[in-house]
Image: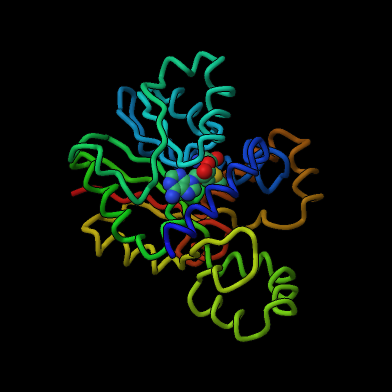
């Protein structure tokens, strides 16, 4: 069952192809999400760090890791996304920072020795597709991280997605019925719906429990995004003024890290330290 679900999501990302590159640049909401993720990541990567990037997609954050001076092992479970990664990153100076490119499922990191990486990065939800193997997968990420190093990840937010996709939830209810939506809203598991994009959504407290259960220490959490999920026209206007935009991003990032905001975005970011 779980393997089938993941194969289904691999097909999804194979078919999505280049569309994944546009996700964090084609809308103001996406551009804010990129800033929230980029600035969060910067706090945990040092020059010379060896980084394993899981679910790298076409390479949006590989460019940032390269700029931060990391040496990067790039992985994804979609061959299409890995090929796109080569097309986007391979022709730029950032390619010097790429140590390797390989297929990898987040649920099986057994090929790596204990304590290999300074940072393991899984942005954009690979952990949300591990379903029943989430604990095993996350435990594996901590195992291959050096003591004092970090697992930095983002997962889909259960409560924030419900709020943001309320219209879609209503349409889905008309399709699959109230009972199925009850299950989605009481488990966070989108496999109970009929949506094409199935994943496990998390509450902030689920993420904290996961990290503690696997022996990690939570270093930081953030939502993405808080004030910038709607009102695209307002955001576009703010973007036309560089000073206002910079101030807005600063306030938005501070707001996203407030305990009261952690469940408010479509994604939850976190950094867990290996003890
Ligand atoms: C939403 S994209 C994020 C890409 C990039 N990390 C970013 O944040 O811009 C999710 C990526 O994770 C990959 N992925 C999904 N499930 C995975 C799994 N179980 N193991 C490894 N990669 C996975 C997908 O193929 C896709 O490239």
How many numbered tags mark residues here? 0
| Location of residue 231 in the rendering, given as x and y in whole percent from the top left corner | 77, 56
The way the protein has been coloured in the rendering is rainbow
| Location of residue 129 in the rendering, given as x and y in whole percent from the top left corner | 46, 56
* Above or below for 41 versus 84: below
Q: Is residue 250 left or right of residue 131?
A: right
* Above or below for 3 versus 146: below
Can residue 119 be seen from the camera position used here?
A: yes
Q: Residue at x 51, y 65 (%)?
A: 263
Q: Residue at x 38, y 27 (%)?
A: 72
Q: Is residue 61 left or right of residue 32?
A: left
Q: Quadrant of residue 184?
A: bottom right
* Above or below for 213 versus 249: below
Residue nearest the viewer, comparing 7 with 67:
7
Q: Residue at x 37, y 52 (%)?
A: 220
Q: Report the residue that reaches farthest toward the bottom.
A: 179
| Location of residue 150 in the rendering, given as x and y in whole percent from the top left corner | 30, 43
Q: Is residue 102 left or right of residue 20?
A: left
Q: Quadrant of residue 161?
A: bottom right
Residue nearest the viewer, comparing 180 with 240:
180
> Which quarter of the figure is the N terminus placed in?
bottom left
| Location of residue 141 in the rendering, given as x and y in whole percent from the top left corner | 29, 47
Residue nearest the viewer, comparing 120 with 204:
120
Can residue 37 be seen from the camera position used here?
A: no
Residue nearest the viewer, comparing 5 with 135:
5
Q: Residue at x 49, y 59 (%)?
A: 5
Q: Quadrant of residue 85?
A: top right
């Amino acid at each position: 069952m779980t393997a089938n679900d993941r194969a289904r999501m691999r097909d999804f990302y194979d078919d999505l192809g280049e569309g994944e590159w546009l996700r964090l640049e084609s809308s103001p909401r996406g551009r804010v999400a990129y800033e929230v993720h980029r600035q969060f990541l910067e706090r945990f990567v040092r020059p010379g760090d060896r980084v394993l990037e899981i679910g790298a997609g076409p390479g949006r954050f590989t460019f940032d890791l390269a700029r931060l001076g990391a040496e990067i092992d790039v992985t994804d479970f979609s061959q299409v996304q890995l090929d796109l990664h080569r097309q986007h990153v391979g022709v730029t100076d950032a390619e010097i920072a790429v140590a390797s490119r390989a297929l990898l499922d987040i649920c099986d990191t057994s090929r790596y020795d204990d304590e290999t990486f300074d940072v393991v990065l899984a942005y954009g939800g690979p952990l949300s597709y591990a379903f029943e193997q989430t604990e095993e997968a996350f435990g594996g990420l901590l195992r291959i991280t050096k003591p004092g190093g970090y697992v930095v990840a983002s997962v889909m937010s259960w409560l924030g997605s419900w709020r943001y996709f309320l219209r879609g939830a209503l349409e889905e209810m008309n399709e699959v019925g109230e009972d199925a939506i009850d299950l989605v809203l009481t488990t966070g598991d989108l496999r109970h719906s009929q949506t094409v994009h199935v994943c496990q959504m998390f509450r902030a407290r689920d993420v904290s429990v996961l990290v503690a259960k696997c022996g990690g220490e939570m270093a930081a959490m953030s939502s993405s995004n808080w004030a910038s999920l709607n009102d695209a026209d307002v955001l576009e206007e703010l973007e036309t003024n560089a000073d206002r935009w910079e101030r807005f991003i600063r306030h938005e990032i501070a707001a996203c890290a407030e305990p009261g905001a952690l469940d408010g975005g479509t994604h939850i970011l976190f950094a867990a330290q290996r003890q």
